[in-house]
Amino acid sequence: MVSEVASELITDPGGIYLDATIGGGGHAELILRHLHTSGRVIGLDRDRDALREAWGRLAHFGPRVTLRHADYRDLAAVFHALGIEAISGALFDLGLSSLQLDDPSRGFAYRFDGPLDLRFDQSHGATAAAWLATATVDEIADVLRRFGEERHALRLARAIVRTRAQKGQPLATTADLTRVITAVVGSRGSDFGRTAARVFQALRIATNDELTAIPIGLQSALDRLVPGARLVVIAYHSLEDRLVKSHFREWSRLCRCPAVWGRCMCGAHPVGRLVHRRALRPTAGEIARNPRAKAARMRVLERLPDQLDMRPSD
């Protein structure tokens, strides 16, 4: 949703913009091309490989680009270190990038054989293989249900633990895990593909603790938006999208006073407004060019002044 990012995000061509998931730098490059020469982009990513890719693409913008190896949780610290108190917009393109998905050494895709890593930041934390080596049936089933919404969760969890015991060693590769999935649901038809995608998604989310980090990052970005600036989030699966939708609705509805009062009496002013009532979707043309875009959902929140007068105008 490249063109939508530019039109929905940029309200001040001379401002500072955050790309909280810079990936290969595609969105950041687009943003910079729409800004004046005084405009800047701060780019974050948990993946060092992504940062190297992004810098190769963005280096010619020079000091207008600042990249940091950081998690959403680190946003407040990054802003503080850079001396940035206000920004003109923030973009969160959630999930994983094509760069990560197409690299067999990362383990994100079941169609490639590689180490069962699934970490965005390979310098930190345990791999998915390490967690599966010790997790119980109940723990595995819980992750598959909560983060993958997988109906075969318990059967898959039992099969993983059983295979681990029979082999006398943990599942170490994506092929190891795929064989277990095949044994449970078969290798043909759409059921295998859907189940495999949900299992890998669930393990990725759990390995990177993604759903905990998202609200922290969104709040840190919202806190620094100037009035009129926008927070744009692109999500690719229902768990992420529901989380974003819930927070955006809460931030736009903090006031609980009845509408007939005409003004807020509770003091809990909304901090943002929903720019669109529903999530924006990619066009048919974009889906044709990039089938992975089909699942994308974009939501946009605009920052309101801190003291919003809710009285109707004359």
Image: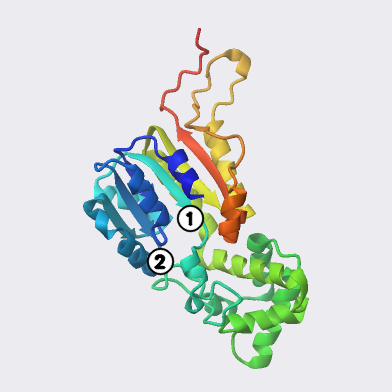
Tell me: residue 195, above or below residue 214.
below
Residue 82 place in picture, x, y as percent = 25, 50
Say which element carries label 1. Answer: helix
- Give the left or right position of residue 69, taking residue 288 as reference: left
What is the quadrant of residue 274 in the picture? top right
Q: Secondary structure at mark 2?
A: loop
What's the residue at 56%, 14% (across, down)? Answer: 262
Q: At 73% from the left edge and 73% from the top edge, which residue is drawn?
A: 192
| Total count of labels | 2
Relative to 270, is 25 above or below? below
Picture residue at 53% right of the left edge, 13% below the top = 312
The amino acid type of the residue labelled 2 equals Asp
Which numbered disc covers residue 38? none
Q: Position of residue 113 (x, y in %)?
A: 56, 82
Q: Name the foreground residue: 210 vs 235.
A: 235
157 over 51 or under it: above or below? below
Residue 19 shows in the view: no
Residue type (three-letter) at the residue carrying disc 1 = Ala
Q: In which image quadrant can residue 158 be found?
A: bottom right
User: How was the colour assigned to the protein in this rendering?
Assistant: rainbow
What whole-number distance in Å separates the C-alpha atoms at marks 1 and 2?
15 Å
Residue neighbourhood size for the residue with mark 2, other residues' Cα within 10 Å, grouped as few (<14), some (14–19), many (≥20)? many
Q: Say whether residue 11 is left or right of residue 248.
A: left
In front: 115, or 127?
115
Q: Position of residue 18 (x, y in %)?
A: 37, 48
Q: Nearer the viewer, mark 1 or mark 2?
A: 2
Regarding residue 94, the answer to whether it shows in the image is: yes
Q: Position of residue 176 (x, y in %)?
A: 62, 84
Name which residue lies at 41% across and 71% down: 124
**Residue highlighted by disc 2:** 47
Say which residue label 1 marks: 213
Question: Residues at badges 1 and 2 in contact (C-beta under 8 Å)?
Answer: no
